Image (cartoon, rainbow, N blue to C red):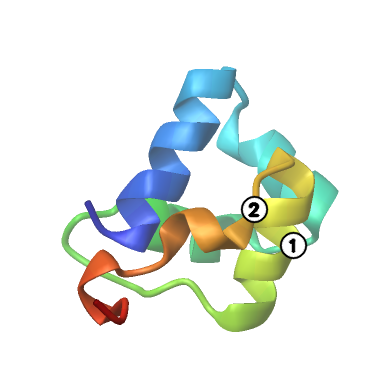
Amino acid sequence: MSLEEHISKCIEDKGIALTVVSRRTEIPYMALYDSLRNKSKKREIKGKELVKLCKFLDIDSREFEDKELEVK
């Protein structure tokens, strides 16, 4: 699951409208939409956006670590 898919799922699981996320995080709605819902755009979440989203959703950004990059 990609970072964007994981964030989108977190938002859906919490039942929060994307417009609310946009207003509270001050991330433009279309940027969120293109990253999280618009499959044809495939826009990646920016670093500052990730920080704001994690704070808003009350989740730890380490949840999104790529498990393939971990040292074994």
- The local secondary structure at tag 2 comes to loop
Rendering coords of residue 1 (x, y %): 22, 51
In this picture, residue 26 sits left or right of residue 45: right
Residue 49 placement: quadrant: bottom right
Residue at (42, 42) in percent of width and height:
8
Say which mark, if any, is on residue 60.
2
**What kind of element bears circle 1?**
helix
Could one spot residue 41 in this view of the protein? yes
Name the residue nearer the viewer: 60 or 22. 60
Residue type beneath disc 1: Lys
* Left or right, residue 6 beside residue 23: left
| Cα–Cα gap, marks 2 and 1 | 11 Å
Residue name at image x 64 percent, y 53 percent: 60
- Identify which residue is drawn at 27% across, 66% down: 67
Which residue is label 1 attached to?
52
Q: Is residue 37 visible?
A: no
Viewed as shown, does residue 65 lie left or right of 21? left
Q: Amino acid at mark 2?
A: Asp
In the rendered image, the vertical position of residue 16 relative to residue 3, given as above or below: above
